[in-house]
Amino acid sequence: MQPTSLYLHIPFCRHRCGYCDFNTYAGLDNLIPAYTDALIAEAEWLAAAAGERLPVHTIFLGGGTPSLLPLEGMQRLLQALHAAYDVAPEAEISLEANPGTLSPEYLAGLRAAGFNRISLGVQSASPHELLVLEREHDFSDVVNSVKWARQAGFENLNLDWIFGLPGQSLASWQRNLELAIGLAPEHLSLYALSIEHGTPFKELDTRGLLALPDGDAAAEMYELADSMLGGAGFVQYEISNWAKPGADGQPLACRHNLQYWRNLPYAGLGAGAHGFLAGHRTANVLAPAAYIKRMREAVQAGGPTAAQLPRTPATASAEPVDAHREMGETMMMGLRLVREGVSQAGFAERFGSTLEQAYGRSIRALQQRGLLETASGVLRLTQQGRLLGNQVFMEFV
Ligand code: SF4
């Protein structure tokens, strides 16, 4: 059976940052123990509903701030996953963490529990930019976290950074990149700030109070990142992701995210988590308290009956994905992989129709505009296409 991936959502943060639209809550830390129990119950429920032991090759704890969970909860969680699923011995097991929430003991405990990849939300090294973002750490927390993670034995570190911040100059972004490279991570994710509906940043922006760099300035920042990271030995493998080559010469990509970009199955566990499993896109109930209640009541009422995949008691919606939609999603996500792209042979094998039959006209139009290219049987974005990715993806929706 095709290996699957598990995403577990931890919807707690110490403070809600002004730009954030994730399903996360401040001030609900008292729910963490019951939430951990519910998460374990949902993982076990899904495993039982599958009717056979699902092979798992990546696990990702995202948030929110997963590093707010105490070590004891982390250990119980991973033990439960190993008991319920066939977790591959070489599985990638990642945790998102905020720099101000870590300690040497905690990181050593995570490593001993089985985590082998840490993704740190750095966002910026500038005190002013961190203040604007309402982040609660400073750059010295990042330096310490990286040092402690290395001491604990983590050999795979990602640092998340954001560019295009209010008031950010190209020189400031360059300084951020120099510091990012200086920390010698295996992996860097660089995201352009996006202003999301319903956030305090959106309101400030609407009132003209956010001095955002214009599109040209943001494009210049992206191009600067590409050239500086290339010069430092990083390989860009996705629109927003760069990695150092591993022992086999291939970039040390985030294997969990590759599962998304290749449009392969993953279970989404936890409040508000999304999944793509058994041919359905699933979404869980959003509120942590409602999530806990649903799982608790369902467990008290007895386990799942057979053949309920992909639903669990926490599922709020499960939409079937037909072949046409799956093809479009495969294009949209696969083209984000700027080296791997979408393989012509792989697409034909998966869908029984060629790229030309499915999207010939759109592809030719995008090639004429210089946004897509075909090389060695692979369709992928050009350098220009990386800057205008959204225009390309829209053609396949
Ligand atoms: S720490 Fe991350 S998940 Fe939490 S509120 Fe800030 S941006 Fe959102």
Image (tube, rainbow, N blue to C red):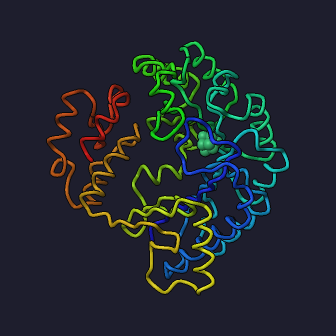
Residue 336 visible in this rendered orientation of the protein: yes
Rendered view: 325 above or below 145: below
On the rendered structure, is 128 left or right of 249? right
Name the residue located 56 percent from the left edge and 77 percent from the top edge: 45
Residue 153, placed above or below residue 179: below
Look at the image and tell me in which quarter the N terminus lies: bottom left
* Camera-side residue of 241 and 100: 100
Image quadrant in which you'd find residue 374: top left
The reply, left or right, for residue 211 in relation to residue 358 is right
Q: Where residue 118 appears, x then y in whole percent?
A: 67, 46
What residue do we see at 59% from left, 37% from top?
187
Q: Position of residue 272 (x, y in %)?
A: 52, 58
Rendering coords of residue 345 (x, y %) = 28, 52
Q: Which residue reaches farthest front?
A: 207
Q: Is residue 250 left or right of residue 28?
A: left
Examine the rendering and report whether any part of residue 85 can be seen: no
Question: How many numbered circles does the render carry?
Answer: 0
View quadrant of ligand 1: top right
Q: Is residue 77 above or below residue 228?
A: below
- Image coordinates for residue 306, horizontal then vertical, percent: 47, 86
Q: Which residue appears at 53% of the width and 26% of the height?
A: 163
| Figure quadrant of residue 325 | bottom left
